[in-house]
Image (cartoon, helix red, strand yellow):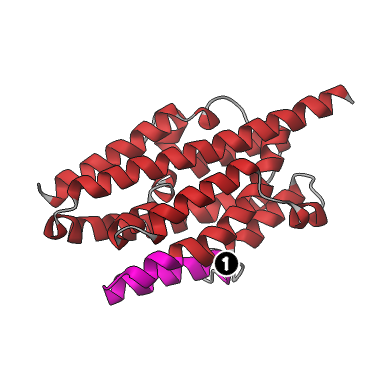
Amino acid sequence: MSAVNVLKRIDAEVDDFMRRTRYFKGDITVGRAYTYVKQHRLNTRQRNSVLKLRVATNCPDWDTKLQIIKACTQEIIADNEYGRGKPHWQILEDLGVEIGLPREEIRAAEPLLSTRICWAAWEGLMSHTHWLEGIVANTCAERANVPGYGEGMLRERGWCGLERHRYNKLFGLRDDQMEFFELHSKADLEHSDMGWRAVARFAEDYRMEDAVVNACRLNLGIWELYLDGIAAEGDRIDARRKAV
């Protein structure tokens, strides 16, 4: 199987994820936006300080290893290319303040049970599998921010492009207040290209074409569960707000 065919297969998995995931449907709500900020700030820190670095540790290709570490530093230490020197989790925290969350509340947030379950699942798929399967886990959801998958606005703008539209509609934010979505539209193209290049370069030689496609499918299933958990908690917050 050629590298082109393997990439087509994992692209098809991303496309299916974008089309089926309920979180992308309809409008965002206040409860879902608040929960996304709190949970994804935690998730960004956990994935990039622990899980993705496990993949880097297992990777024998030096250039790919350094690219993984660079992507992680942008997320958790400082992004001088896209984020004005701030790490991505901090820019997400700033977005939370812009939509009305006290910074102390964001920092005091605990992971939902659904988030913890997803971390446990990713632990298995990123720490205890071949590094090429792990790098798919590193990057497959970042591929969702690249236009061309799903349908409608998702296909035209990518996930973060959709979120820019939804958050602007709900909260009336200016472009500079939605920096998190802007930087991810750019950074995730670079990050996901790294994973896709590794698959194209190594999957056929390692005879792992089916394995990387399966890793992509499993990891996107975990991402769907993660977003479902955020949506469910957000809906509970919205219900409490309406009851007051």
- The residue drawn where x is 59% and y is 41% is 114
Q: Is residue 131 left or right of residue 24?
A: left
Q: Name which residue lies at 33% across and 45% down.
A: 216
| Circle 1 crowding by C-alpha within 10 Å: few under 14, some 14–19, many from 20 | many
Q: Position of residue 106 (x, y in %)?
A: 75, 53
Q: Residue furthest bottom?
A: 62
Residue that badge 1 annotates = 76
Q: From the viewer's side, name the closer residue of 92 and 157.
A: 92
Tell me residue 144's x, y (percent): 42, 43
The quadrant of the image that shows the C terminus is top right
Majority secondary structure of the magenta segment?
helix
Is any part of residue 70 visible from this angle?
yes
Residue sitting at x 41%, y 61%: 127
Using the rendered view, name the quadrant where residue 198 is placed. Answer: bottom left
Q: 150 above or below 215?
A: above
* x then y, percent, for residue 5: 15, 44
Q: Pick whichever, 179 or 40, lies toward us.
A: 40
Instruction: Report the magenta residues as a range.
Output: 53-78
- In terms of image quadrants, where is residue 31? top right
Quadrant housing residue 108: bottom right
The furthest residue to the right: 244
Question: Visible in this render: residue 179?
Answer: no
Would residue 52 be found to the left or right of residue 95 on screen?
left
**Residue most toward the left?**
1
Three-letter code for the amino acid on which mark 1 is drawn: Ile
Residue 112 coordinates in the image, percent (x, y): 66, 44
